[in-house]
Amino acid sequence: MNKLLVANWKMNKNTLECIEFFNEFNSKYSAKRDAWVSPQAIHLSLAIHEGAKKNVKCGSQNASDHTSGAYTGELSPKNLKELGAHFTLLGHSERRQYFNETSKLLNSKVKTALQEGLKVIYCVGETLPERESNQTLSIVGDQIHQGLNDITDAHEDNLIVAYEPVWAIGTGKTASPTQAQQVHAFIRAELKKKFPSFGDKVRLLYGGSVKPDNVEELLGQKDIDGGLVGGASLKAKDFLALCGDK
Ligand code: 13P
């Protein structure tokens, strides 16, 4: 399967900047690697339209665990799907940290999004104090087990897991390929135990200061199937380089 690079634009870019990105990206993207983009929800419709010109799939950065109703400010996974969204990120560390999303709530969001036919990129990762106190694997293991409970084989093609060590996000500090591979191998083993029929097929993305100059080494690791990229996805030129189009 192709490597997958997912741009997480977070709360960045105005409308014109979105259009400029796609104009430049689409002119050079050769689909050597799969490229997905996750803009702010207000730009999703535009991104879906522009991305479709080069089969670049777009998705949201969050989705509700409800499909409709009195949930002011939330994003319905049902309506995201209807709009043409391909996927949603769930459980990004910024959602866990600033919006108090727990793995229990995220389990509900993951199941609802999958039921509505969205692919889910479920994010996990430890903080620096957790890493320094040797808790990385237990924290990541808990996030996997709690967040991915009760997922059936019917969704085997739609689940993706992203490992993003919180200390590597936006800091310029990347996990070394060996550090990243070690956690990815652990996640792979846990997924195989949890989902014997499809755990070995789930795409595993690494996120945290992925840049053109470190991407090849990271993607060269056995259990790293792609990257979830913040800062370096904002410039079309850099995201092209990550996608193998220099
Ligand atoms: P950076 O690539 O800016 O470190 O962000 C990573 C991230 O949070 C992607 O979801």
Image (cartoon, grey):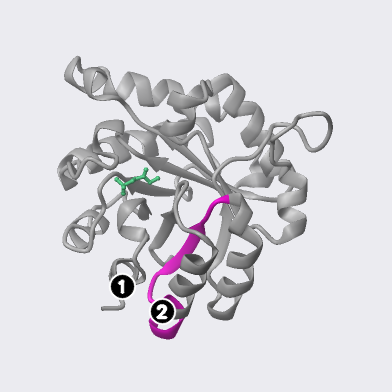
Disc 2 crowd rating (10 Å Cα; few below 14, some 14-19, many 20+) is: some
Determine the residue positioned at 45% across, 47% down: 10
Mark 1 or mark 2: which comes first in sequence?
2
Q: Quadrant of the N terminus?
A: bottom left
Q: Which residues are magenta?
A: 25-40
Q: Quadrant of the C terminus?
A: bottom left
Say what amino acid the circle numbered 1 marks.
Lys
Q: Which residue is mark 1?
A: 237
Asked whether residue 86 appears in the rendered view, the answer is no
* Foreground pick, 219 / 70: 70
Q: Secondary structure at mark 1?
A: helix
- Quick check: is 32 in the magenta stretch? yes
Q: Which mark is residue 24?
A: 2
Q: Position of residue 33 (x, y in %)?
A: 39, 70
User: Is the residue at mark 2 in contact range of ligand 1, meaning its CB lies under 8 Å from it?
Assistant: no
Determine the residue positioned at 28% across, 23% down: 136
| Marks 1 and 2 close (CB-CB < 8 Å) | yes
Dividing the picture into quarters, in which one does residue 154 lie? top right
Q: Position of residue 229 (x, y in %)?
A: 36, 53
Determine the residue positioned at 65% across, 57% down: 85
Give the number of marks: 2
Q: Which mark is residue 100?
A: none
Determine the residue positioned at 43% across, 24% down: 97
Say what amino acid the circle numbered 2 marks.
Glu
Q: Position of residue 108 (x, y in %)?
A: 66, 27
